Image: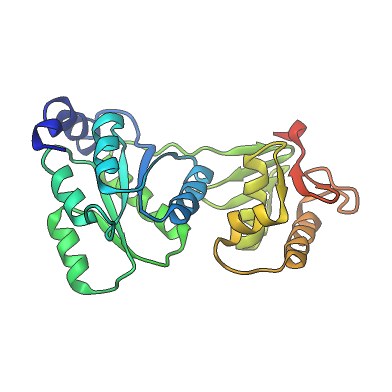
Amino acid sequence: MTRGEFTGAGKNRYTDGQRGGLCRVAKTILVVDDEEAIVEFIEINLKRAGYDVIKAYCGEEALKCLNEKKPDLIVLDVMMPDMTGFDVTRKARLAYDVPIIMLTAKGEDMDKITGLELGADDYMVKPFNPWELIARIQAILRRISPNKTEEVTKISFGEMTIDPLGRKVWKQGNLIELTPREFDLLLLFASHPGRIFSRENVRKDIWGHEFIEERSIDVHIRRLRDKIEDNPIDPNYILTIWGVGYKSNPRLT
């Protein structure tokens, strides 16, 4: 991709629309990493937080997405096979002012310094907490649009209201105290009305690469039901699909 492809309207789109705080609130995130599992893990958590996600698995694909789809922020891996995240940042900065958060498995100060000198807005070291990443995304978007209030999408789930960004849940106006895993489970089911999740699906979406026994998943769901259900023995929110797994009650979402 040549420099000539990063000129014209694209430059103005970010300078006027984001850094100046004159246009829409940022909500589309481009996630770039050559490891598909990492991209999917970030995508799941960003979507739960109310963001749209564009995915790319190499530097060239990232630059093409940037040029064509104009994301509001980029989450960018440093080490990729075709070009490094530093190279992508350098080329992107020729025309666009889109904020960039760099990801790396390294904790070396020189990598951080190099990324920031090239124009990255923030830097995180793998492995990382996805909600810390979301918090940093929020902070950057607020900073570049100081006169705008970021949209917060709340989810209605029966008599419950779920705030994905604040990670809070209310039922009939009363705050429900959930553990982080319980909240993630509730958000997973509320965000996918009627979708059936096997225990392996739940493990991958909530625990990622961390090993957990299927029986432990059942225990977490039972404890969640104890807190959200009027009658945990006859649940109304999270239903058991015998021999398969679980699903949310589609009539409630």
Query: Where the N terminus falls, by quadrant?
Result: top left
The quarter holding residue 13 reads: top left
Residue projecting furthest to the front: 82
Residue 98 in picture, x, y percent from top left: 23, 41
Where residue 33 sits: x, y (%)? 36, 53
Rendered image quadrant of residue 81: bottom left
Q: Position of residue 27 (x, y in %)?
A: 39, 37
The residue lying at 31 percent from left, 46 percent from top is 74
Question: How did the renderer colour the structure?
Answer: rainbow
Q: Position of residue 109 (x, y in %)?
A: 21, 73
Give the camera-side residue of 251 and 244. Answer: 244
Quadrant of the drawing holding the C terminus: top right
Is 24 or 220 nearer to us in this picture?
220
Q: Residue furthest bottom?
A: 108
Going 20% across and 67% down the picture, which residue do you hit?
111
Residue projecting furthest to the top: 9
Horizontal relation, residue 7 to residue 214: left or right: left
Please state the total of marks drawn on the protein image: 0
Residue ID at (30%, 71%): 106
Relative placement, left or right, of 131 versus 160 is left
Q: Is residue 5 left or right of residue 26?
A: left
Residue ranking furthest to the right = 233
